[in-house]
Structure formats: structure tokens, C-alpha cells
Image: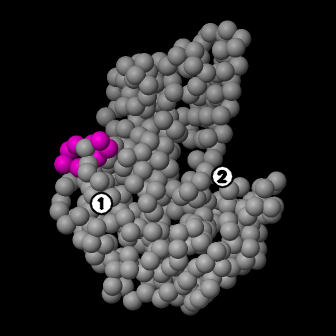
């Protein structure tokens, strides 16, 4: 699959933009702050329903306007598909495919892309929420229905937290709050699916991650991802960890899949009920899980050098693209590299260029063309002050 045309209306600093694209490599070039990243950010939104730069859709709507439109004409084999989304300030977002309305969360079903940007160094060095977001976005690209599961789970956590806070304010004890049992069951039902799906995906990433890391870094440092589940006491505030671990030890199944996950989740909730009432927070579940990244059996966070951290982050995105490529009925995902080459040394630039050469469409942004390795056969699009000035 590749993007044949990208059109924007009132998106970021673009009043209007229309860019014709082709298969192969395209470089958006121009000084910093002109709008190169905004172009590729719009495509990332179509694929993941989010931005790699902000958690708010409102920030992507041009100042002084009430809505923004992203429209992309996609081509796969001999078939063309028009996909568009309207971001609204005062109402729900709207989406269309071939001019017919669809639910916004269905968009990842039609378009797939993998974006790598300097911000992705936070995958290795940042907070657990960054790693959770990475794995959840990849889950949705592989199985778009999980966007609904993730949204439902987040709503249950919000409702459950409200109930816990209300109970704390009223001075209720654990045995006096039978309504919480209903929310517990819904939390477990949705949470188990997310835990099991994440765990399975991490397993599938193992081989492509190792191959991608060796390709980028030139050495095999045994990169590994390990899920750390809050229902097993692996993460959490110091005063919670022992209690969750004790709850987990009371459950016997050997695996974390199926019934084992449900039993462990329920045991952890029962053990932590008093502490949750004291805090007014849901203390276990997918929203508090972590992914441990390792190199040579040491945590990448805190031990990996700057270059090793870059290599791990790059390898994660390349492995994601490889998984999507293998499993998608619409061909390769569109690979987007946002101002990445400027952050890499010469060796990693060459290695990355070689790794992406086989993808159907690669979009690159660069402040200066010299940052992009020679030999990519790139087509140039020049950007200035929110306008496409030359194609």
C-alpha cells in the first residue's frame, strides 16, 4: 500500500495543502518549524488515531478554526481508497471511507503506517506509559477492534476510580461496597483480553526485534522485551508491590493466559481492596503494567548508551513494520522517518537506509538534504511556512 495523495485542511499550520505522492522514497525537506512533521503526523493519525507529539486532538486543529480535515487517497495493487477524518473542537470526530461514514476507530482497518521520530527515544528512556502506548497502538493496527476494548477499559477504570473516591469520602469499608464487585468483573473481563493480547504480541516481536537490532547496530546484544504485570506484583508504588505479589502467590496456574490471568487479576483486586479504598485509585490492571527492555540481560533504561538506546528504539519500530508487513492483506505499512537521520551517526544512517529499502513507500523529513544518506533514490518535496512550495 502507498499514499497517492495527501490533502489537509486547517491541520496544524496548514490552511490547505495537497501533495501528490508515489511509491518509493519521498523526502520532505525544509528548515525547522515549517510544517514537515505536520504532514507526516497527519498520516500517523489515520493509522493510530493519535499523534506522536500530543495527547490532544485539539492541538492539531489550526488556531482560529473549529475543525481540521485529513484526507488520503490510498492505492494497493489496482484498487484506490479515499480515507478521511475530521477533527472537531466541539463535537465528536467524524470519519469517511470512499465518502461513506464509518466509525472513527475503524480507520486503522484501512491504513497502516509506522512512524519513527526523535521522541521515540522515550520508548527506552521514558516512563512506562510511553511503552504501554507503543504496544497498544501496534495492537490496534493489527486488530482494529481492540481500539474499542481499550476505550471501554479506560472508561471502566475512570468509573471505578470515581466509585473508590466516593467511598473514601463517605468512609465506607471494603465489605460495604458491593457495587464495586460489578465494576471488578468488567475490569477483569476487558483487562484480561488486553493483557493476553499484549503478551502474545511481545512474543511475536522477539525474532524481528533481534534481527532489526543487529541490522541497525551491527552487533547482537540480545535485545529482549518482557511484560511486567501489575497483577503479579511486578510494578507499582513501593507500598503496593508486596501486597500484589502476595495476592499473585495465592493463585496456582502456571501461565498468564486464559483462566490463569483472570484468577490472578481477581486475587490481586481482592488483596488490594482496602488499599484501593484508601487511595481512591485502581492499583492493578493493564493501565499500570510495564514492558522491560533489556540488552545483554541488563535493563536498557539506565544501562544502555545513547547509541544503544537509539538502536533499540529503531529496532522496535522496524520490527513493528515487519510484523505488519507479514500479516496485512494490504501489503507494506507506510514507513515514516521524521527527522531521524540527523540524530544518527554515519554508520547507523547507512544501516537504517539499508533496512528500509525494501518497503513500498518511505516518507522522510529532513531539515537539510545532506542528512539523508545517498542512494535512497528519493523524490523531493520542499516545505516552507505551511505550504508545499515545490514537488
In this rendering, position of residue 389 left or right of residue 123: right
Q: Residues within 10 Å of mark 2 (few under 14, many from 20)?
A: few
* 140, above or below 70, in the image: above
How far, Cα to Cα, is label 2 from label 1? Answer: 29 Å
Residue beneath disc 1: 311
Q: Which residue is located at x 57 percent, y 15 percent?
A: 278
- Residue 126, given in percent of the width and then of the height, sits at 42, 45
Q: How many marks?
A: 2
In this rendering, position of residue 390 left or right of residue 163: left
- Of residue 272 and residue 266, the one placed in the foreground of this image is 272
- Residue 180 shows in this picture: yes
Q: Quadrant of residue 100?
A: bottom right
Residue beneath disc 2: 56
CB contact under 8 Å: marks 2 and 1: no
Magenta stretch, residue numbers: 294-302
Q: Quadrant of residue 205?
A: bottom left
- Helix, strand or loop at label 1? It is helix
* 101, above or below 300, in the image: below
Q: Which residue is located at x 29 percent, y 46 percent?
A: 300
- Residue 111, given in percent of the width and then of the height, sits at 57, 71
Position of the C terminus by quadrant: bottom right
- Residue 135, given in percent of the width and then of the height, sits at 45, 52
- Helix, strand or loop at label 2? It is loop
- Residue 180, given in percent of the width and then of the height, sits at 64, 23
Q: Which residue is located at x 36 percent, y 85 percent?
A: 376
- Residue 140 shows in this picture: no
Amino acid at each position: 500500500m502507498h499514499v497517492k495523495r495527501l490533502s489537509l485542511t486547517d491541520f496544524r499550520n496548514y490552511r490547505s495543502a495537497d501533495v501528490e505522492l508515489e511509491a518509493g522514497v519521498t523526502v520532505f525537506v525544509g528548515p525547522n518549524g515549517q510544517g514537515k512533521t505536520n504532514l507526516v503526523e497527519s498520516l500517523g493519525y489515520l493509522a493510530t488515531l493519535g499523534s506522536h507529539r500530543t495527547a490532544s486532538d485539539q492541538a492539531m486543529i489550526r488556531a482560529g478554526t473549529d475543525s481540521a480535515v485529513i484526507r488520503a487517497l490510498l492505492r494497493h495493487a489496482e484498487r484506490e481508497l479515499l480515507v478521511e477524518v475530521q477533527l472537531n473542537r466541539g463535537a465528536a470526530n467524524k470519519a469517511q471511507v470512499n465518502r461513506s461514514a464509518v466509525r472513527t476507530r475503524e480507520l486503522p482497518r484501512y491504513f497502516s503506517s509506522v512512524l519513527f521520530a526523535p521522541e521515540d527515544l522515550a520508548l527506552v528512556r521514558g516512563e512506562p506509559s510511553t511503552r504501554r502506548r507503543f504496544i497498544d497502538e501496534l495492537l490496534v493496527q493489527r486488530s482494529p477492534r481492540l481500539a474499542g476494548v481499550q476505550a471501554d477499559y479506560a472508561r471502566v477504570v475512570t468509573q471505578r476510580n470515581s466509585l473508590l473516591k466516593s467511598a473514601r469520602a463517605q468512609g465506607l469499608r471494603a465489605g460495604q461496597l458491593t457495587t464495586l464487585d460489578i465494576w471488578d468483573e468488567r475490569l477483569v473481563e476487558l483487562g484480561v483480553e488486553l493483557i493476553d493480547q499484549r503478551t502474545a504480541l511481545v512474543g511475536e516481536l522477539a525474532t524481528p526485534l533481534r534481527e532489526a537490532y543487529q541490522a541497525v547496530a551491527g552487533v547482537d546484544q540480545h535485545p529482549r522485551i518482557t511484560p511486567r504485570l501489575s497483577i503479579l506484583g511486578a510494578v507499582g508504588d513501593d507500598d503496593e508491590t508486596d501486597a500484589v505479589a502476595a495476592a499473585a502467590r495465592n493463585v496456582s496456574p502456571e501461565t498468564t493466559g486464559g483462566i490463569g490471568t483472570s484468577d490472578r487479576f481477581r486475587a490481586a483486586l481482592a488483596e488490594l481492596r482496602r488499599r484501593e479504598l484508601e487511595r481512591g485509585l485502581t492499583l492493578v490492571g493493564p493501565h499500570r503494567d510495564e514492558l522491560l527492555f533489556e540488552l545483554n540481560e541488563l535493563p536498557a533504561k539506565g544501562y544502555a548508551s545513547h547509541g544503544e538506546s537509539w538502536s533499540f528504539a529503531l529496532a522496535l519500530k522496524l520490527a513493528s513494520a515487519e510484523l505488519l508487513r507479514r500479516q496485512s492483506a494490504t501489503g507494506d505499512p507506510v514507513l515514516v522517518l521524521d527527522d531521524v537521520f540527523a540524530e544518527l551517526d554515519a554508520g547507523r544512517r547507512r544501516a537504517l537506509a539499508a533496512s528500509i529499502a525494501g518497503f513500498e513507500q518511505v516518507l522522510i523529513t529532513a531539515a537539510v538534504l545532506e542528512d539523508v544518506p545517498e542512494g535512497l533514490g528519493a523524490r523531493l518535496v520542499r516545505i516552507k511556512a505551511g505550504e508545499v512550495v515545490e514537488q
